[in-house]
């Protein structure tokens, strides 16, 4: 610092000391117990087909798609700290392995990549198709869309995307980012030593994702027809298209043509739904546009 040699007094102490002391740890700081690092143990339970095509259907999109996909009985699970996060299915009508992931318990940010790595290390899929959502209210685009006419979008690490373009599926464009576990699956799949063909399909969501939990919480399964699914009333045509494109992406076009997506609803539930007024989904301007 500059010191005036003609000054009658010495500079104050704070003017002589550096700011380095501000970086010193405060001995009076009380550590938050939630800041302690949690160890996560990931296990693959049961039997699943190895070196086969893999479909990972995540969170809300996975839960609702699975209701009409006729997946059959669960044959295994991907568990984190003894909590089932991914439900594994091997339907007889497809050679692929299907994982319905994070439908009822979401993963903390710190374990997402390890979860995806464990799945790849165990199943060694030759190609992978992923289903997830993108938040329409915060999606940056040059066009404005409402929830009911928002497009299905995709990300792919393979050049063979013509079948998606023909179906009107639009790319998930920059500067938008995927911040769910699907990003971990796709990044690992894009490595030269991993899958040959990798596609992520994204349904529009009227919700902005909440912050990731610090701990894994075991949630109860919602009852059929509960309000948890009411806000995601994707059309049957949209879900049927997603179903077909998922299997097209892993090279099973014949499966997509003979095994259609069909939502099984009990008669009493269907009548109750027809009598009840449909909920309106308000999402502001329906996305950020430039």
Image (tube, grey):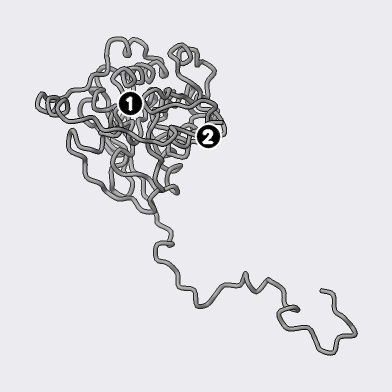
Residue 22 on image: x %, y %: 63, 72
Q: Is residue 288 at all visible to an observer of this figure? A: yes
Dot 2 lies on which element?
Answer: loop
**Residue at the limit of the structure toward the right, as seen here:** 6
Residue 271 on image: x %, y %: 12, 25
Choose the circle earlier in sequence order: 2 or 1. 1
CB contact under 8 Å: marks 2 and 1: no
Residue 78's place in the image compared with 54, above or below, is below
Residue 207's place in the image compared with 25, above or below, is above
* Res. 251 image quadrant: top left
According to the image, label 1 marks what residue? 97
**Front residue (pair 241, 197):** 241
According to the image, label 2 marks what residue? 176
- The quadrant of the image that shows the C terminus is top right
- The quadrant of the image that shows the N terminus is bottom right
Give the alpha-carbon distance from disc 2 to disc 1, as whole Å: 29 Å
Residue 73 on image: x %, y %: 20, 29
**Front residue (pair 97, 186):** 186
Dot 1 lies on which element?
Answer: strand
Q: Residues within 10 Å of mark 2 (few under 14, many from 20)?
A: few
Q: Is residue 126 at all visible to an observer of this figure? A: no
Q: Left or right: 4 with respect to 57?
A: right
Query: How many marks overall?
Result: 2
Q: Residues within 10 Å of mark 1 (few under 14, many from 20)?
A: many
Residue at 35%, 30% (x, y): give it. Answer: 57
Residue at 38%, 31% (x, y): give it. Answer: 123
Residue at 38%, 50% (x, y): give it. Answer: 213
**Front residue (pair 87, 161):** 161
Residue at 53%, 29% (x, y): give it. Answer: 141
């Amino acid at each position: 610092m500059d010191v005036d040699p003609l000054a009658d007094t010495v500079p104050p102490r704070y003017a002589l000391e550096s700011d380095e002391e501000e970086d010193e740890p405060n001995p009076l700081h009380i550590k938050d117990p939630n800041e302690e690092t949690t160890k996560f143990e990931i296990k693959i339970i049961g039997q699943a087909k190895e070196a086969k095509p893999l479909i990972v259907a995540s969170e809300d999109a996975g839960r609702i798609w699975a209701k009409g996909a006729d997946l059959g009985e669960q044959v295994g699970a991907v568990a984190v700290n003894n909590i089932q996060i991914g439900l594994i299915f091997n339907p007889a009508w497809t050679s692929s392995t299907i994982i319905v992931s994070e439908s009822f318990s979401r993963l903390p940010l710190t374990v997402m990549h390890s979860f995806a790595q464990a799945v790849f290390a165990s199943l060694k899929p030759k190609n992978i198709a992923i289903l997830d959502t993108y938040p329409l209210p915060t999606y940056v685009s040059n066009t404005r869309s409402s929830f009911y006419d928002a497009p299905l979008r995709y990300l792919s690490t393979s050049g063979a995307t013509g079948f998606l373009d023909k179906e009107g599926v639009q790319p998930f464009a920059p500067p938008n980012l995927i911040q769910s576990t699907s990003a971990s699956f796709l990044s690992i799949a894009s490595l030269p030593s991993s899958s040959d063909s990798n596609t992520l399909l994204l349904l529009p969501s009227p919700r902005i994702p909440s912050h990731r939990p610090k701990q894994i919480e075991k949630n109860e399964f919602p009852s059929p027809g509960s309000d948890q699914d009411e806000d995601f009333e994707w059309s049957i045509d949209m879900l049927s298209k997603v179903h077909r494109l998922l299997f097209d992406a892993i090279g099973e076009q014949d499966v997509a043509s003979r095994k259609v997506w069909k939502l099984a609803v009990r008669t009493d539930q269907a009548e109750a739904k027809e009598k009840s007024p449909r909920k309106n989904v308000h999402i502001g301007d329906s996305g950020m546009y430039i």
